[in-house]
Structure formats: C-alpha cells, structure tokens
Image (cartoon, rainbow, N blue to C red):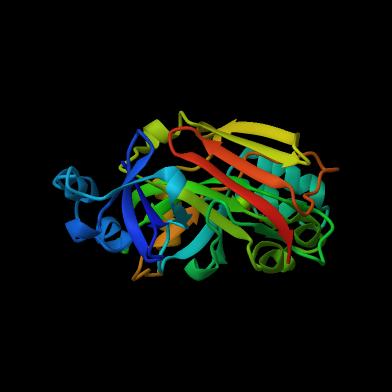
Amino acid sequence: MKVCRFLAGDNAVRVGWVDEDETIADLTPAGISTLSNVLESPDPIGLLKAIDRKPLPRHRLADVVLRAPIERQEVWAAGVTYLRSKTARMEESDFSATAYDRVYDADRPEIFFKALAEKVVPTGEAVGIRRDARWSVPEPELALVISSKGTIVGCTIGNDMSSRDIEGENLLYLPQAKVYDRSCALGPWINLGVTEADARDWTVRSTIVRGGAAVFSGETRLGNIKRRFDELAAYLCRSQSFPYGAVLLTGTGIVPPDDFTLHEHDVVQIEIAPIGVLRNSVVTV
Ligand code: DO4
Ligand code: MG
C-alpha cells in the first residue's frame, strides 16, 4: 500500500492512496488530511483497508504534483552500512580511512543528522551540488519511515547527496559535506507494511543522465546492507525521542567511479521497483 502527499487543482496539499493503476484516491473525505494520521495510527494498514475508496475523488498521477512524503519528521542517515561504501571512503581519504574501517565492524553504527522536513526535495525538483565542492555524488538509499514510537511503518527512496572532496578532506567536515540546501530528496511516496525480509530481496538501481545520455548506472541489492533495519532504527531512537517520527536513510551501496562528479542539469534517477522512481535534476547551490 502506497501513500503520498500531492497537490491537485486547488494547490492544497492532500494525502492520497496510490493504486496499482497509477491513480491517486484523495483520502481527505475519509478524514485523513495528514500523513501522520496514517503513520501514527496503531494499525496503518488496517486503517486504510477499512476505507471505502469508491466514493473518493480520483486523480491520474500525471495530473498531480507530488510533494515529498514527509511532514515534520527529522531526517537522519546511517553510513558505511555496505562494504562498497566502506572501501570507497577508505580510498577517498588516508586521513579518515581507519574511522570508516572501524565503524563498519563496530556494534554502534554511524548515524548522522541529514535534514529538516521542510528542506527535503520531492521527486521532480532539483537536488543540489555545493558551489564550493569539486566532487559531488548522489547516494541512492532505502529510507525507513519511523513512527514516534520508534516503529518502522514504511519505506521510501532517498538520495543522500554528498560532497566527497569535503568529506574526504577531514571527517569533521562531514556535516558540511552532507547538509546543505537541496541535499536530501525523498519520494515518490511511502510503501506501508513492508517486511525487512521482502525489502532485502529488492534491488536499488541508479542512473545519471547528462544531455540525454546515461553517464553512470549502478545497482545493488538491499540484502547487501550489513545491519538489520530494526537495529539501525533502535540506535537512532536510543536516548532520543522523535515526537513527529523520523526518516532514516540506510546507507549507499552504489558509488560512481572516483573520476565522476555530478554537473548542473544532470538528472539523477533512483529506482527501487516495488516502490517506484525518485527523479531529480541537479542545480548548483
Ligand atoms: O561517513 C560517511 C557517510 C557514509 C554514507 O552516507 C553512506 O555510506 O551512505
Ligand atoms: Mg549516505
């Protein structure tokens, strides 16, 4: 079951149920006006199943504008959860190599703050590359949607945009490499009730298009993530409460070659087939 935030004719943000036939049922007449109404329910799937969709207004996906599937949640990100991410980062920086090597094997994962909800970019809008960075990449990641009780209630696709030269220069620069305008995209919507066992069979595919041609393609299986999803969520929620819930990016296993950097006007496409596609052009910020 997929739920989204969308704008229809009157420019009000509504919550919709996305059907397999690519239409959206507007949940407003059913009393659901926020995503939190669903995500914070004791039984999100049961809540939706109890709704009679027949009388609800319907829109074709092509006729609406999707907003990022987030309201007031903080966005956090786990790092170095794939062997590919560890080796890429160890090559990027002699200075920080030991830290990446150690965190990959440590009990405690790397988890860092990524974005406030209002700064998250939806599918169809531009993600940013910093004007003071020379080496910028997308990080295609599964994003876990976590309720205020710390329960994983759904998932979506995330892009943890990163400035690798800034991160590689000094580990203490990580917040500047990771947190800046348009550095986080989420979407297109949230899949509810996915089990970790199912998701581990899914493939993440990423393509970067420049001037109409693909300049990078890569893929990985979510089963390559070293840590369990509930382990990551539990670490995030240790000694920290999230009254509006949280979104946790689970790390990247797709790393373009070291001579690749994003350019303005590139288009980054990330697909996890059972969820959908997150597509963003690139702008310098
Ligand atoms: O410390 C580096 C960040 C790691 C990261 O974002 C990832 O592995 O996805
Ligand atoms: Mg990342």
**Along the line of sight, which residue is nearer the eye, 136 or 113?**
136
Q: Is residue 197 visible?
A: yes
Relative vertical location of residue 284 with respect to residue 137 in this rendering, above or below: below
**Relative to the observer, which residue lies in front, 191 or 31?**
31
- Residue depicted at x 37% and y 68%: 242
Identified at 20% across, 58% down, the residue is 29
| Drawn side of residue 228 relative to residue 139, left or right | left
Figure quadrant of the N terminus: top left
How many numbered circles are shown?
A: 0
The percent position of residue 253, horizontal first and vertical second, equals 62, 39
Quarter of image, res 49? top left
Q: Quadrant of residue 171?
A: bottom right
Along the line of sight, the residue nearer the viewer: 269 or 228: 269
Instruction: Assign the C terminus to one quadrant of the image.
Output: bottom right
Residue 29 as seen in the image, left or right of residue 214: left
Looking at the image, the residue that sits furthest to the top is 201
Residue drawn at (43%, 33%) of the image: 274
Relative horizontal placement of residue 4, taking residue 74 as reference (left or right): left
